[in-house]
């Protein structure tokens, strides 16, 4: 497996930053896989195993996450623009872009900013407006205020408090079902730079991509779940929010699982791969769950 580091030149041209680390495996049509907040590219190990005989898998770990050195904010813009530079540099023809959570947000932003570069996109439990995730009536202005309050709260934590926060946030079982998977996710979180995690969360919950979805020209599949977040939502509310948030993405296919938690690729890979296989082959399907 090849390991590459992308050096992303800043607009001044005087400095360079590494926006993400990339591992490449397999052969065939290019597929780029972007993990979520504080997650390693290992999130996609089972996905790579499933697709490596048909796709050349370019697996990212975002700067600041899971032991990769951080970059200064704005992080997500650098990942988005760095991805465009990476695709052009490596002459990747219309890659499939797969993103989980924060990675799904980056995939949406990328496809709207660089529609000429994007092939099909697969969005795994992610939204264009995270600020309205559990409050559909939240305005973009209120979302930005909430995000800044989030920054203040996280910045005020001691390191011990932050460690407890990472562990408790994962242990609610909203993320994943198996203990072994949970331990890996917590380890990635603890190996992540807390400033990077804070910056990324604030950027994620401050942004609103909904209007920009009209610029996306490639086919899109959205895979979502709700059972890990029963405290805040139910299936009907989740489905309504998904369709409202993705209303301006023409032709989007939205599927919801009733069994997998947030890391769908770990909790129910068979469901996810079945839908992805049909989507990548150009066929639409109705989920059985």
Image: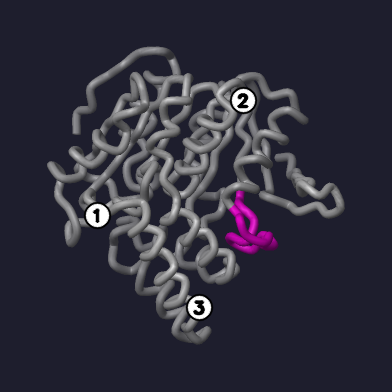
Q: Secondary structure at mark 3?
A: helix
Q: Is residue 108 left or right of residue 66?
A: left
Q: Is residue 72 magenta?
A: yes
How far across and how far down the image is residue 282, in percent? 41, 13
Cα distance between the residues tagged 3 and 1: 23 Å
Front-lying residue, 243 or 215: 215
Query: Which residue reaches farthest front?
Result: 141
Cα distance between the residues tagged 2 and 1: 34 Å
Region of the chain picked out in magenta, as a range: 61-75
How far across and how far down the image is residue 167, in percent? 40, 73
Q: Residue at x 35, y 33 (%)?
A: 222
Does residue 274 appear in the picture of this structure? no
Q: Is residue 181 magenta?
A: no
Q: Mark 3 packing: few (<14 Cα in 10 Å), some, or many (20+)?
A: some
Quadrant containing the C terminus in the rendered view: top left
Task: Give the mark nearer the N terminus: 3 vs 1.
Answer: 1
Q: Is residue 67 left or right of residue 221?
A: right
Q: Mark 1 packing: few (<14 Cα in 10 Å), some, or many (20+)?
A: some
Nearest to viewer (mark 3 / mark 2): 3
Nearest to viewer (mark 2 / mark 1): 1
Residue marked by disc 3: 155
Which mark is on residue 19?
A: none
Task: Give the mark nearer the N terminus: 2 vs 1.
Answer: 2
Residue marked by disc 1: 134
The answer to whether mark 3 and mark 2 are in CB contact below 8 A is: no
Which mark is on residue 30?
A: 2
């Amino acid at each position: 497996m090849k390991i590459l580091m992308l050096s992303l030149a800043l607009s001044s041209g005087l400095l360079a930053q590494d926006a993400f680390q990339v591992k490449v495996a397999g052969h065939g049509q290019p597929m780029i896989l972007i993990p979520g907040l504080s997650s390693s590219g290992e999130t996609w190990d089972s996905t790579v195993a499933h697709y490596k005989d048909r796709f050349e898998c370019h697996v990212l770990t975002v700067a600041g996450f899971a032991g990769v050195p951080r970059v200064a904010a704005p992080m997500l813009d650098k990942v988005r623009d760095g991805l465009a530079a990476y695709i052009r540099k490596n002459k990747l023809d219309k890659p499939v872009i797969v993103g989980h959570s924060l990675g799904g947000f980056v995939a949406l932003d990328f496809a709207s900013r660089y529609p000429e570069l994007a092939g099909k996109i697969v969005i795994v439990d992610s939204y264009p407006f995270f600020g309205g995730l559990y409050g559909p009536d939240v305005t973009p202005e209120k979302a930005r205020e909430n995000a800044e309050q989030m920054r203040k709260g996280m910045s005020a934590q001691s390191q011990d408090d932050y460690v407890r926060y990472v562990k408790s946030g994962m242990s609610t079982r909203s993320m994943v079902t198996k203990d072994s998977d949970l331990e890996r996710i917590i380890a990635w979180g603890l190996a992540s730079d807390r400033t990077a995690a804070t910056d990324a969360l604030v950027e994620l919950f401050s942004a609103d991509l909904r209007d920009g979805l009209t610029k996306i020209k490639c086919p899109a599949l959205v895979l979502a779940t709700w059972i890990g977040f029963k405290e805040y939502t139910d299936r009907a509310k989740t489905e309504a929010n998904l369709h409202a948030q993705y209303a301006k993405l023409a032709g989007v296919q939205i599927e919801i699982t009733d069994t997998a938690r947030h890391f769908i690729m770990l909790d129910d890979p068979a469901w996810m791969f079945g839908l992805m296989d049909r989507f990548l082959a150009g066929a639409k399907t109705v989920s059985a769950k």
